[in-house]
């Protein structure tokens, strides 16, 4: 399998090309795409639970999973854009370690 960040850069190239936005706006569009995808996941989750006005279930767990993946992928694309020196992998690994260490410490205390 290709390196994760090679794949992310390919996705980023596609997203930047599709946007048609001036270069200075591309970062903003990529960053806001994260919340757009996360909101879509939340809406599908609500519909999966039947928490609408009519109580009808109109989304499936795989659809919710796909939108959560889309939000994560959008975040990684934005992180890559904000890491022009190729440091996205290091930033991600550092933050993942921070979160893991914190969770491990909190879980041990409970």
Image (cartoon, rainbow, N blue to C red):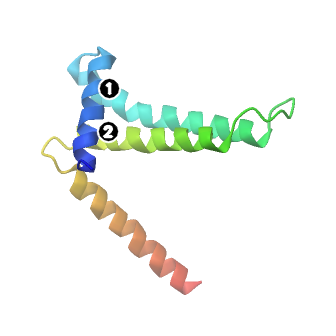
Q: Nearer the viewer, residue 29 or 63?
A: 63
Image-quadrant location for residue 56: top right
* Up-down relation of residue 108 to residue 66 (above or below): below
| Pointer 1 local density, CA inside 10 Å: few below 14, some 14–19, many at least 20 | some
Q: Which structural element holds mark 1?
A: helix
- Check if mark 1's residue and mark 2's residue have beta carbons within 8 Å: yes
Q: As drawn, which residue projects farthest toward the right? A: 54
- Image quadrant in which the C terminus is located: bottom right
In screen coordinates, is 13 left or right of 102?
left
In screen coordinates, is 41 left or right of 30?
right
Q: Which structural element holds mark 2?
A: helix
N-term-proximal mark, 1 vs 2: 1
Image-quadrant location for residue 39: top right
Q: As drawn, which residue projects farthest toward the bottom? A: 109
* Up-down relation of residue 33 to residue 96 (above or below): above
In screen coordinates, is 10 left or right of 65?
left
Give me the residue at 18% from left, 51% from top: 87
Q: Where residue 77 sits in the image (x, y, percent)?
A: 32, 38
Q: As drawn, which residue projects farthest toward the front? A: 1
**Residue 77 disc label:** 2
Cα–Cα span, label 1 and label 2: 9 Å
Q: Where residue 102 sits in the image (x, y, percent)?
A: 43, 73
> In the rendered image, is residue 82 in sight?
no
> In the rendered image, is residue 22 in sight?
yes
Q: Where residue 73 sits in the image (x, y, percent)?
A: 39, 41
* Up-down relation of residue 90 to residue 14 (above or below): below
| Pointer 2 local density, CA inside 10 Å: few below 14, some 14–19, many at least 20 | many
Give me the residue at 28% from left, 63% from top: 94
**Residue 15 disc label:** 1
Give me the residue at 39% from left, 38% from top: 74
């Amino acid at each position: 399998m290709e390196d994760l960040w090679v794949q992310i850069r390919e996705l980023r190239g596609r997203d930047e090309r599709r946007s048609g936005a001036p270069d200075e706006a591309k970062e903003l569009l990529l960053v806001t795409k994260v919340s757009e995808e996360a909101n879509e996941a939340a809406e599908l989750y609500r519909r999966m639970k039947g928490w609408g006005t009519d109580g009808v279930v109109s989304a499936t767990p795989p659809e919710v999973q796909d939108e959560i993946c889309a939000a994560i992928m959008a975040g990684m694309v934005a992180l890559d854009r904000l890491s022009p020196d190729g440091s996205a992998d290091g930033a991600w690994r550092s933050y993942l370690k921070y979160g893991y260490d914190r969770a491990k410490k909190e879980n041990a205390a409970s």
